[in-house]
Image (cartoon, rainbow, N blue to C red):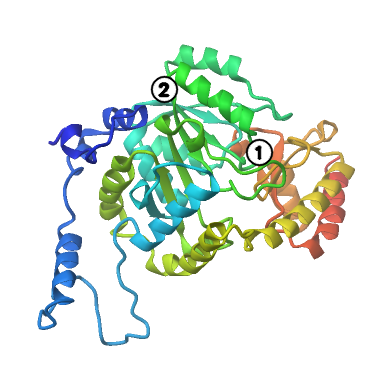
Amino acid sequence: MKNLNDIIVKGEKITPILKCVWENMPSQLKQVMGKEDPIFEISAKAEAVRLKKKELVRAESGQIRGILPELETYYSPPIGKVELRTLLAEFWSKFYNLKDITYENIAITNGASQGLSLLMEMLVYKQKVILNVPYWPNTPDIITRTGGKYIEFELVDTKGKLRLSELSKLVKKENAHIMFINFPNNPSGIALDKQQMTDLAEFSRKHNLIIISDEVYNRIRFKGTPSTMLSFAPERTVSVCSASKEYLIPGARIGYVISASKTITNVFFKQLVRIDSSCVSTIGQDIILPIIKKETEELKNNKPLSFLPPVLKELKQRRDALGKQLKETGFEIAGGLPDGSIFMFAKIPETLKISDTKFIEKAIQMGKISGIPGSECGKPGWIRFCFGFVKSEDIDRFGKNLKDVVKAVK
């Protein structure tokens, strides 16, 4: 088995995040790190030679070619096309004012879910993870599946205030060194402002915390400007991102992981994606490439970004309209109205004396509305509604139907 010094990208320093990943990585994963992908390496060499010597006949790749070329889709490099990774690096560098980010700092994955799962496999085995509440229901299962233990903690209260003093006590009590955060939050839509991110970065250094930052809703913001934890604590943060939400293509399954450590993204992730799914979706990359290319060109030419503004305008209208219906029916909305994301987290009026699970069961049974019980997100008594999924023309009907359910359960 190789050691870290044998694998680390030339010239890279061992930062807290890289040190933590290597120390926590299960031994069976360490055994595959530093190996080359024999098929991809031979394919790349063969194609390079073929471009110069046309007589070379390639017979190394496990693909079918030349029978139905109009349908054939070929394998991508394991962690994505260099062109797409380069565009993402340029976009993030300019949009978030990050330094020293190249394509090697980005690993494309089959959705943010795969990125998060593989990162957890590396980082949380036999470790305690502070899990920000409320959370995406899949997150606890991912931590458990990869051999970690999660400890629920509400980092931000429903008024949007950080609870760092309480977190300090919990970190010391549990001797935890990893924290998972998600802002703008799914399900509440609460986001951190730059001062809060600064405070959290300082806190993480003081307590030697590693941060896994789920930033899939980062650019869907209605209040404040998008920021990434990589701007505030790059040496101890890995960001997990997605094209699904900001570009409206969840079915394309394109996520990506960004780290200041090229070893994590360009070495570790390359190996894990290769043995997990061979490569990332070629079709998904082809869908997202022209969109990212256009946005990157707009940034380079100091032009306003054109893709998201009309989407955000429509989402904000839906957010405001749905929030009005919920408030009129007596529901409390976390944070007032969501700062970002496509979700609204609403507390069931206490006068109803019914659980969130039973409320949703009744609402669906009546054929009125649906939502996700807050119990599944670590916060009983609340319900997640997605205004991204509710069309504007359906919001008045949502409000009427919600009132019918409330009346029925009183």
Estimate how packed mark 2 is, as few (under 14), some (14 to 19) or many (20 or more) residues with alpha carbons within 10 Å: some
Instruction: Report the quarter where the C terminus lies.
Output: top right
How many angstroms separate mark 2 from mark 1 (CA)? 27 Å
The residue positioned 41% from the left and 22% from the top of the image is 177
Q: Residue furthest front?
A: 301
**Eye-nearest disc, 2 or 1:** 2
Q: How many marks?
A: 2
Amino acid type for the residue under numbered disc 1 = Gly
The residue positioned 48% from the left and 22% from the top of the image is 204
Query: Can you identify the residue that label 1 sits on?
Result: 374
Q: Measured along the vertical axis of the image, is residue 17 above or below residue 402?
A: above
Instruction: Report the quarter where the N terminus lies.
Output: top left
Tell me whether circle 2 and circle 1 mark residues in contact (CB < 8 Å): no
- Disc nearer the start of the sequence (2/1): 2
In depth, the one of 319 and 83 nearer the eye is 83
The residue positioned 89% from the left and 44% from the top of the image is 328
Query: Can you identify the residue that label 2 sits on?
Result: 177
Amino acid type for the residue under numbered disc 2 = His
SS class of the residue under badge 2? Answer: loop
Q: Is residue 97 left or right of 190 when viewed as pictured?
A: left
Residue 133 seen by the camera:
yes
Question: Quadrant of the rendered structure where residue 169 is?
Answer: top right
Q: Is residue 318 left or right of 150 when viewed as pictured?
A: right
